[in-house]
Image: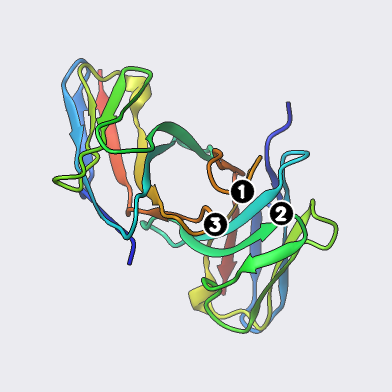
């Protein structure tokens, strides 16, 4: 079956531009996570949704980062006024349940801010 | 708080060599522990997991044992293959809503 998909796969933005990154989770998955992976580092948690409710946004690095999942399926991570330090791979993961289920990761969106 | 410390790479081995990648953790409560693998050009995949102390996770010839007394979850394989070349991430899931805490990753290259 289809896995987690993300688009675009690559995004180049000029500093100060706004970007929107999309995640299509596995159909029926309740939980959705966003992670940020800087070059040479492990993924760092950004935010978590259970259906359409954003239950944890403690990892969002600034108020320029915003995520939504309005219908409990597709999610969008938006970054306003991008900065060079936002350059990273943004990973989306979904899981069937709340805590004890495997997280399935998408291929990521590589964002480069110039 | 929760954190994972992982052996730094890169690790370069010949085919059929023995592999160990060290992972230690700090956690509150009773975490679950994971190894994820990222093959070139692909997304993160779960390799194995252990959900309580003394559990052994295993998959594709890889093993790791959850050691509470040493707060460790070292990854081992008795005989690596060229196809095992990838980046390996140790991770833990605490008790809060399923978020994962990852180590920095270890690049493994296996030569024929």
Most foreground residue, B70 or A21 = B70
Please report contact status of discs 2 and 3: CB closer than 8 Å, yes or no: no
Residue A104 horizontal side relative to residue B111, left or right = right
The part of the image, by quadrant, that contains residue B67 is top left
Per the image, the residue denoted by label 1 is A98
Please report contact status of discs 1 and 3: CB closer than 8 Å, yes or no: yes
Residue B89, percent across and down? 36, 44
- Badge 2 and badge 3 both on one subunit: no
Residue A6 to residue A71: above or below: above
- Name the residue: 68% across, 41% down: A4
Mark 2 element type: loop
Dot 1: within a 10 Å radius of its alpha carbon, few (fewer than 14), some, or many (20 or more) residues?
A: some
- Badge 1 and badge 2 both on one subunit: yes
Per the image, the residue denoted by label 2 is A8
Residue B11 to residue A57: above or below: above
Per the image, the residue denoted by label 3 is B97
- Name the residue: 54% across, 38% down: A102
Residue B32, percent across and down? 38, 44
- Name the residue: 65% across, 53% down: A32
Residue A69 horizontal side relative to residue B57, left or right = right
In this rendering, the label closer to the viewer, 2 or 3: 3
Report the Cα–Cα distance between label 1 and label 3: 7 Å
Please report contact status of discs 1 and 2: CB closer than 8 Å, yes or no: no
Residue B91 horizontal side relative to residue B110, left or right = right
Q: Quadrant of the N terminus of chain B?
A: bottom left
């Amino acid at each position: 079956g289809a896995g987690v998909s993300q688009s675009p796969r690559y995004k180049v933005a000029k500093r100060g531009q706004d970007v929107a990154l999309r995640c299509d989770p596995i159909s029926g998955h309740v939980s959705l996570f966003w992670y940020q992976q800087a070059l040479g580092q492990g993924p760092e948690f950004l935010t978590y949704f259970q259906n359409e409710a954003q239950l944890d946004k403690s990892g969002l690095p600034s108020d320029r980062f915003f995520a939504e999942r309005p219908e409990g399926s597709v999610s969008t991570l938006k970054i306003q006024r991008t900065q060079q330090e936002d350059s990273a791979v943004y990973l989306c993961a979904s899981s069937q349940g709340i805590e004890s289920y495997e997280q399935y990761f998408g291929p990521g969106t590589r964002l480069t801010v110039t | 708080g929760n954190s994972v410390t992982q052996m730094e790479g890169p690790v370069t081995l010949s085919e059929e060599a023995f592999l160990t990648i060290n992972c230690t953790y700090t956690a509150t409560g009773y975490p679950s522990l994971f190894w994820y693998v990222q093959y070139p050009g692909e997304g993160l995949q779960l390799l194995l997991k252990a959900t309580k102390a003394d559990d052994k996770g295993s998959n594709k010839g890889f093993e790791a044992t959850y050691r509470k007394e040493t707060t460790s979850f070292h990854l081992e394989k008795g005989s690596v293959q060229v196809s095992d070349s990838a980046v390996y991430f140790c991770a833990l899931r605490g008790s809060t809503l399923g978020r994962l805490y990852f180590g920095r990753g270890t690049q493994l290259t296996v030569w024929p």
